Amino acid sequence: MNACKAKSSLSGVKNSNVLCMTGHGYRRPRCLTTLFSPMTKSIASFTLATVLIGLTLAPWPAAYAQQSEGKIITRSQLGAWALRYDESTPGLNCAIRFIPGKRNADSLAIFGPTAKAAYSALLFSGRNIPPTRSPKEIQLGLHLMGLPESTLKGVIMPKQADTKTYNLMIATSDIRKLLQSMRDSEEKLQLTIQREVIPETIVDIDYDGLDKARVAMLDCIAGRKPGGQDMDSALAEIRPLGKSTIRGSAYYKGGFLASKQYPPKGSEAVALIWMSKEFKAWYEEVKATKKAPEYIPENIAKHIMSTKILDDEGGFSFSRLPAGEYMLIASFTYNETISVPEVVGQTHVFAGNRHIGTQDHVVNWSYLIKEPTTFQKQVTIQSDGEVLDVALDKSQILCFFVCF
């Protein structure tokens, strides 16, 4: 990739989601700034919410998704390479993806040939890729550390459903040459587009471990069974596994007669904390220091899991859990209608030449605004194999009866 120019093609291109894993491993739950609100009631001048605000900017160690698919080839502090393949079609439908360790970081996937398309492709995903409604060819600047800038063509793809990112595809005819052209690690791999005078960076990626991922990908496209750990084995190194499941629906209800409002399907609106003795001890240490730690150690990160909302009614599920105590946390925005009065005119009343009063003409304007909400529920799995059905809700029904 350091010197090659890939040819782009729109024919037969499909925006495959073969690497989109439920829960998305190596992602931090979006509600970390308020995860521990039920545990901070006894703290006067310092709360763990303060700690967690700082952690949103800190590097995040490896954690794993809920879904058991594919294999983990290698992992590090930067992230992990995951391999997906189809045993029923040897040599086809192979793909590797670098899952970054930082939340909202750009990601990179490499797709091999399929039964319908002989080409291979790189697929970059990121929040700074320009939006488009249909595939759009674009000229790119490729910036690699220690090498001169080169140019290549790519295709910006429409946003996938239930995601916040757009994809940039670079197609190439020979996946072996593509893999060999790429270095084993990159610091600040950047793709830019020209914006008037100053180029704009739309992709920025750090990765390592491609030496191992490359071997696994070449084995896969050669029809050999690739190495690596299956997801369950990799997850077992992070935290104990069990046979239990916590599932349910998350929603907000703003009043007795109000309808339920659910987090968007596909959003990472629900997180789960395994409240082990190890985690509680770490929390007490952090609370005592009154300072946000720069890193969360991996032995603590294993306690924090996130998943995607599965449907339009706030459905979520966490599986392969051991017995124990857990904290469910929901964090999303809901719609609220507010009424704002505005004086649009006045009527002045006179008796003779004497002003005796003024009447304002008021119009009430209604606005729909987005309001954030975070709430939690503590649950306990009593025995391994148990399935807990939970209504993770925040309701103002009690206030309806008591507050008014």
Image: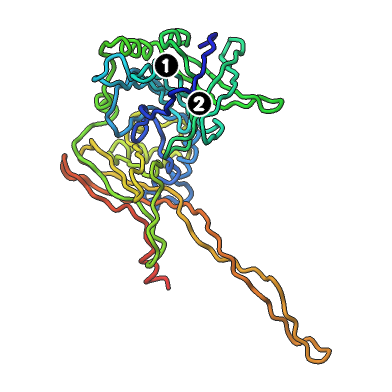
Q: In this view, does 140 lie to the left or right of 164?
A: right
- Point out which mark residue 168 bears: 2
The answer to which quarter of the image holds residue 284 is: top left
- Residue occupying the point 41% across, 14% down: 210
Viewer-nearest residue: 206 or 344: 344
Mark 1: amino acid: Ser
Q: How many marks?
A: 2
The answer to which quarter of the image holds residue 403 is: bottom left
Mark 1 or mark 2, which has the lower sequence index? 1
Viewer-nearest residue: 126 or 161: 161
Would you call the spot at circle 1 few (<14 residues within 10 Å), some (14-19), or many (20 or more)?
many
Asked if residue 78 shows in the view, the reply is no
Viewer-nearest residue: 37 or 194: 194
Mark 2: amino acid: Leu
* Residue linked to disc 1: 120
Relative to 107, residue 315 above or below: below
Location of residue 109 in the rendering, given as x and y in whole percent from the top left corner: 42, 22
In this view, the residue farthest toward the front is: 11
Location of residue 182 in the rendering, given as x and y in whole percent from the top left corner: 47, 11
